[in-house]
Image: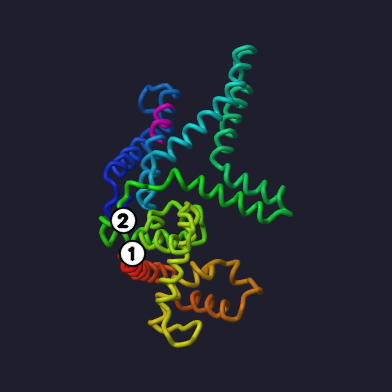
Amino acid sequence: MWRAFRGGGPQLPLATLLTATIFFALSMGLLAIPILPLPVSVILLAISGDLALLGYGISALDAFDEGEALLPDFLRSLGFSAFAALLFGGQVAVAMLINGVSLEMLVLLLAVMATAIATQTFSDPIQSALDRLIFARFPRLRQARADLRAAASALPRVNEALDLETIDEVEFARLTRRALGHMGDLQRLAANPLTRLPVIEARLAARGEPASTLSRAAELKALLAESIARLKPRTGDDFGTSDEWRYYNALYFPYVAGLKPYSRRSAFDNGLAPLEKAVLDWFQAQVPERTLHNWQNAAARLVAQDLREQSN
């Protein structure tokens, strides 16, 4: 909350989040220490309202941070969740009306509704897991279905009201930093506003490729990789540890090469190439995580400037 406030985040979600946090803490205190003579049902209802406000504040701040739209995706998720809960929970509710209400039936009702909502919420990972199991012998079909799911999931989050030509340098750099962090996740990258850069439109048109959601995301990924490559010192080496290498190292190896410098698993991975092993050893021995984060932020500003120059 403090970082969002200092970064000029939307004031209404910040105020809502702060207010909901205070009232949620008060409600929990009343539940633990019943100072006021209020029924438990009233306190639980107040907690649920606080949680709803907390959810809105967190979602709005996250959408602002990612440069995404909130309302269309919220309505889609709310509608699907309500329909699933009503469809499956309604059957249990009808059985309760016929046979009477009992503790077992209440537990079953809540479990069925929670399962229905969770199934909708995690529908993409569930479908991906089922595809890996069912279509194990059809990798092209599995990849095509994954691409379609990524496009369908990204479309409601695209903020078409954001004008890239009018935003300031700080906001453009923040969106670039987010895009860099999502280079390995095409679904999140597809919702980034930078996919609508004029240079992406021009590159796709030059190849005669339709400007679809996934093609824009793939082109943005390629554009970011090219900008990162321009940060590489022209020494002829693949890796260096001097100051001139720090911005390239901070972006290329974590985001393009896919290395995780501070992962414990990577330290015991015997399948790494000698160069990758040397890079990981340097990061772990010489570069604290906070320093890497600062380098990535500074490098993202350089990449953002490069993207703007190409779009002009």
Task: Please give the label number shown on residue 33.
Answer: none
Apparent side of residue 281 relative to residue 133 in the rendered image (left or right): left
Q: Residue at x 27, y 62 (%)?
A: 169
Question: 181 or 261, which lies in front?
Answer: 181
Question: 221 or 244, which lies in front?
Answer: 221
Q: Nearer the viewer, mark 2 or mark 1?
A: 1
Q: CA distance from mark 2 to mark 1?
A: 10 Å
Residue named by callout 1: 311
Local SS, label 2:
loop
Asked where in the image residue 116 lies, by quadrant, the reply is top right
User: Is residue 47 highlighted in magenta?
Assistant: yes
Apparent side of residue 148 relative to residue 301 in the rendered image (left or right): right
What secondary structure prevails in the magenta region?
A: helix
Q: Position of residue 206 (x, y in %)?
A: 44, 64
Crowd around label 2: few <14 · some 14–19 · many ≥20 (10 Å): some
Residue named by callout 2: 164
Question: 164 or 237, which lies in front?
Answer: 164
Chain part drawn in magenta: 45-51
Q: How many marks?
A: 2
Q: Residue at x 45, y 61 (%)?
A: 204
Q: Position of residue 5 (x, y in %)?
A: 28, 51
Asked if the residues shown at circle 2 and circle 1 are in contact, with their CB atoms under 8 angstroms apart, the answer is: yes
- Please identify the residue farthest to the right as the structure is shown: 137
Asked where in the image residue 56 lies, by quadrant, the reply is top left
Asked where in the image residue 15 lies, by quadrant, the reply is top left
Q: Residue at x 34, y 59 (%)?
A: 174
